[in-house]
Image: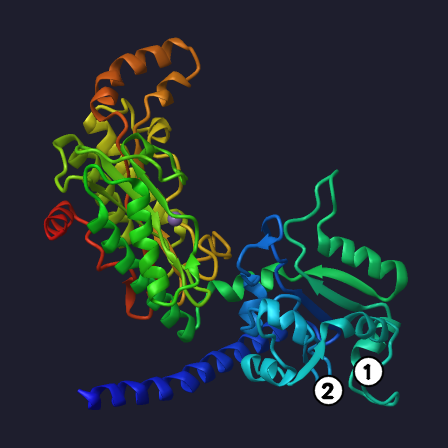
Amino acid sequence: MRYPILIAALIAVMAGPVSGQELQNDLKARRARVMERLTPESMLILWSAPVKQYSGDVDYEFRQDSNLYYLTGLDQEETVLVLMPGNAERKEILFIKPRDAVREHWEGRLLSRNEATQESGIATVYLATDFEAFLAAIFSGRPYAAPAASQEYARFASALKDNRATLHLLLTPGPGVSGELPVNYQFVNKLRERFFGFTASDATPVLRDLRQLKTAYEQKILEESGNISSEAHMAGMKAARPGAYEYEVEAAIEYVYKKNGAFDWGYPSIVGSGPNATTLHYSKSSRRMESGDLVLVDAAAHYKYMTVDITRTYPVNGTFTTAQKDIYNLVLQAQAEGMKVARAGARLADIHQKTVEVIKQGLLKLGLITDVSGDQYRLWYTHGANHWIGMDVHDVGEMGRPLAPGMAFVIEPGIYIRESALDNLPDTRENAAFIAKVRPAVQKYMDIGIRIEDSFILTESGLKNLSARVPRTVEEVEAFMKTR
Ligand SMILES: [Mn+2]
């Protein structure tokens, strides 16, 4: 069977540069769209993420800042991107960590300037050690690494002179009243002590709005990321059984990420069985699962800087109890109704509202609330049904923006029955009457926590479910669990 291997190798050789080119074209288009939204008299600066210490002299594996990656495709530390839309030629300027043979022996190879250009498509690349000199020249109204008479940086220089240059940085979240000033604010203040003629402006909305609309390339990667995470969920389902530990399910899931070339998880895996299923961000994964338990699994990979978000809840022994099914089917119905609302022009809030309506009616029927007109349902449905997904699992994006093709988001209703929710109610006569009425149902459903979450892209032809292949209905889940 040499022939197929040869073909596979050929395809791999062909796919490599092509997909690299695709990313590079996308990066170029993203930078162009950012610059369209900046004035020609401005400069945008973005920094790479800081290296984070794990413990002692060991750091976490490096994860690039999402915005910097979005515009450069580089996942190397000590990188700075400068955009100057008013420049003659050098509208895009990159600063990278200088190569160093000794350090590279310890920490790995660093990009040469040529390689940084090849990966990012940015022609002008300097060393990070030159960044200070660059700033000093530009903010003094001089060209950098160009003849004194060069018109390269003239637009920004004359704007500085006239007091109307703009420095765009990420300034969200803003500073508090006390406490340390965010680093970008410190940077602006330092620059202001030395130079004149510019104001600082927050570039967060520009990147937020652009990242909210996924390009064709991003949609493709998000879909691949969704496929890996879907496979991982099914591997997790196969690892669940009475007597196994939650961490065994987690390990089975994360193995699939790594095996498929994902960097790691997009967010720490949640594997909560029994009462742990009612803790929204339970992360210990240390409990031994028992027959009769449900296990709630919320997990997804970080693959090529794209992350979906998937939750499944299933019986450890493979069969739902009647009580578990009552709650499960209600959550499922809420999600299904929510999906129908998810059309172009609708808002995330409309989807959430639909899930609320369904869940209110269902909770009333199950005896868990006594009134659908108010907020009683919030005792059991304690979070929103939606958020954007993309480079970050809770991706940037304006919440109220009407849905349009290219937007990616989750629909994730959930119900969590914790008896302590009743104990925490203020001691009033109405609450006492309410508690007396719902107590039997609460005892019946106690410690059941169910969330069903799928990841979607809205496309021109409608809603595309990126996690559709993971068993979801009671019948699908039970049938799948039988295949273990
Ligand atoms: Mn989520």
Colour scheme: rainbow
Q: Residue 154 carries which label?
A: 1
In the image, residue 422 lies at what x, y percent?
A: 36, 19
Residues under numbered marks 1 and 2 in contact, where contact means CB atoms less than 8 Å apart? yes
The one nearer the camera, 452 or 116, is 116
Q: How crowded is mark 1: few (under 14 residues within 10 Å), some or many (20 or more)?
A: some
**Left or right: 319 as drawn, with respect to 301:** left
Mark 2 highlights which residue?
88
In the image, residue 361 lies at what x, y percent?
A: 24, 33
**Which badge, 1 or 2, comes first in the chain's sequence?**
2
Quadrant of the image occupied by residue 325: top left
Q: Residue at x 60, y 67 (%)?
A: 106
In the image, residue 5 lies at what x, y percent?
A: 24, 86
Q: Which residue is drawn at 26% across and 60% down?
A: 231
Can you tell me whether the CB of the residue at mark 1 lies under 8 Å from the nearest atom of ligand 1? no
The one nearer the camera, 129 or 171, is 129
Quadrant of the image occupied by residue 80: bottom right
Secondary structure under tag 2 reads loop
**Left or right: 23 as drawn, with respect to 156:** left
Residue lying at the far top of the rendered structure: 429
Q: Residue at x 69, y 67 (%)?
A: 45
Q: Residues within 10 Å of mark 2 (few under 14, many from 20)?
A: few
The one nearer the camera, 80 or 422, is 80
Q: What residue type is labelled 2?
A: Ala
Q: Which amino acid does label 1 sit on?
A: Ala
**Left or right: 460 as drawn, with respect to 122:** left
Judge whether 100 appears above or below 484 on screen: below
Residue 374 visible from this viewpoint: no
Q: Residue 317 carries which label?
A: none
Q: Which residue is drawn at 37% across and 48% down?
A: 350
Judge whether 197 appears above or below 249 on screen: below
